[in-house]
């Protein structure tokens, strides 16, 4: 993403920040979860970012619904990681706070398209 896009959209900036944070933490997941939980969580996060690009850059508003689904999927996977004791409570709280903010920004984009 160019510096211009990042300055223009808090949604892109917050998504990038969240993905960097998430990948730094999933890199520390135990080896037994690397090809299951880690891969699915990272793939869902990247798909979330991809769907945002489709919605905003390619003007495909239906992609926002797909982004919402990926955000829901990430929440479920992060919750599972916490249950497996891979994400401590403080990381869970931080991740959910960031995902909640992303959800609000996606919702704002949806409202902006409908008006």
Image (spheres, rainbow, N blue to C red):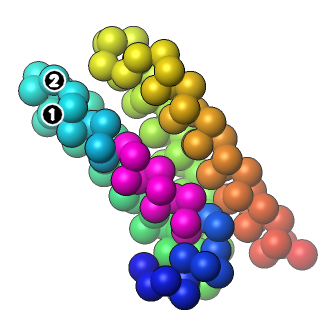
Residue drawn at x 50%, y 75% is 53
- Give residue 66's position: percent from left, percent from top: 54, 58
Residue range highlighted in magenta:
12-22
Position of residue 19 relative to residue 37, above or below, is below
- Give residue 87's position: percent from left, percent from top: 37, 21
Q: Which residue is mark 1?
A: 34
The quadrant of the image that shows the C terminus is bottom right
Q: Which mark is residue 30?
A: 2
Near-viewer residue (88 or 102)? 88
For label 1, the crowd category at 10 Å Cα-Cα, with few meaning under 14, some 14 to 19 and many 20 or more, is: some
- Give residue 27's position: percent from left, percent from top: 21, 39
Find numbered disc 2 in the image and state the secondary structure of the residue it sits on: loop
**Residue 99 visible at all:** yes
Q: Which mark is residue 86?
A: none
Near-viewer residue (70 or 25)? 25
Q: Give the side of residue 85 with respect to residue 67, left or right.
A: left
Q: Is residue 47 magenta?
A: no
Residue drawn at x 49%, y 83% is 3
**Front position among marks 1 and 2:** 2
Q: Is residue 16 magenta?
A: yes
């Amino acid at each position: 993403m160019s510096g211009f896009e990042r300055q223009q959209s808090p949604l892109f900036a917050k998504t990038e920040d969240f993905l960097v944070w998430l990948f730094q933490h999933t890199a520390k997941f135990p080896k037994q979860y690397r090809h299951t939980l880690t891969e699915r969580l990272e793939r869902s996060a990247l798909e979330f970012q991809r769907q945002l690009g489709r919605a905003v850059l390619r003007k495909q508003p239906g992609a926002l619904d797909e982004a919402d689904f990926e955000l829901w999927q990430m929440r479920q996977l992060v919750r599972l990681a916490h249950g497996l004791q891979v994400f401590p409570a403080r990381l869970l709280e931080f991740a959910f706070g960031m995902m909640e903010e992303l959800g609000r920004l996606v919702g704002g984009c949806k409202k902006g398209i409908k008006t």
